[in-house]
Amino acid sequence: MNIAFAITSQQGERTNNQDRVGHLLTEQNACFAVCDGVAGLPGGEQAARIACDTLLDALASQAFTVQESRQAIEKSDRAIREAQQINPKLQRMSTTLAALFIDRTQQLAWWAHAGDSRIYHFRRGYLKQMTRDHSLAQRMKDAGYENTGINSNLLYNALGAETMREVSYSEVITLEDGDAFLVCSDGFWLQLATAEMEQALRMVNSCEEWLTLMQQAIDRARKKDNLSAVAVWVGSPQETTLLQSLTDSARLLPPRD
């Protein structure tokens, strides 16, 4: 099974980049992760680094299963909490997580997330958000309340958070040729509607081009937050994508002189 991927991570207007992006690609498995240190608390950058690096290190020496991927995430959370105990100044540090796992041998995929980093899945011409944010804004929306003006960064779940909550795990899906995934931090998805991500995919021939086109649209806006993303293509997504309308793609194309 052919897997191609591309990565972007930018600082935006922040003083530093608290996102951590990592990948693992072996003959048997693959893992792509984005961690975003929770803002407003000391140590977000360290928490993101610990979580991402621990996850990938735990999976690097084996052909992992769903259960072993869960154990690796639990190990990442423990590693953050151990670091909190060592340095009292970092005792509240925490990070979001979005991780995509692939069994290349059996052609299966599953994912996990905590916080508001997201995973999107493209199949048969359509892109769908596969994760639901662990945020106050999402909870209010789910309950049918107006959430306009609510800070989307108010999270109730993150690795290392004071209140421990279980990470959300997906079901296992069978991969199809042409599947594409986007794993990203909130700084990335807040700048683009799902329809724009989908339209960008219809205009390109590689995952690198997909990220570049979305990045160009983001660059024309004000980038307040760190923004990171991993685009993952399974097989040949370009054979199922097609530019449908120049009108729909207007924001993704550079302005004419």
Image (cartoon, helix red, strand yellow):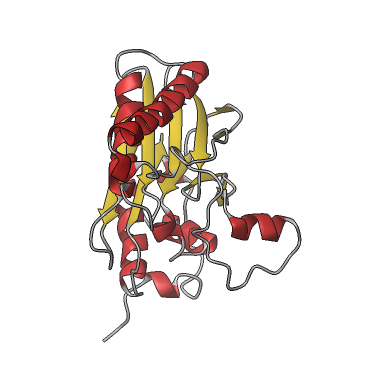
User: Can residue 3 be spotted in the picture?
Assistant: no
The furthest residue to the front: 88
The structure residue drawn at horizontal position 66% and vertical position 54%, both measured from the top left corner, is 139
Image quadrant occupied by the N terminus: top left
In depth, the one of 144 and 4 nearer the eye is 144
Q: How many marks?
A: 0
User: Depth check: 203 or 96 in front?
Assistant: 96
Location of residue 27 by image quarter: top left
Q: Residue furthest bottom?
A: 257
In the orientation shown, which residue stands out farthest toward the top? 62
Q: Position of residue 144 (x, y in %)?
A: 76, 62
Above or below — where is 103 with respect to 222?
above
Query: Can residue 89 be seen by looking at this rendering?
Result: yes
Identity of the residue furthest to the left in this view: 15
Where is residue 155? Give x, y as percent.
Answer: 53, 52
Measured from the top left, where is residue 133 in percent x and y? 56, 50
Q: Is residue 78 left or right of residue 219?
A: right
Whether 83 is drawn above or below 253: the answer is: above
Q: Quadrant of the C terminus?
A: bottom left
Hey, which quadrant is residue 211 in on the image? Answer: bottom left
Q: Residue 83, how many percent across, how many down?
A: 31, 32
Query: What residue is at 30 percent from the left and 70 percent from the top?
Result: 219
Residue at the location (52% across, 30% down)?
110
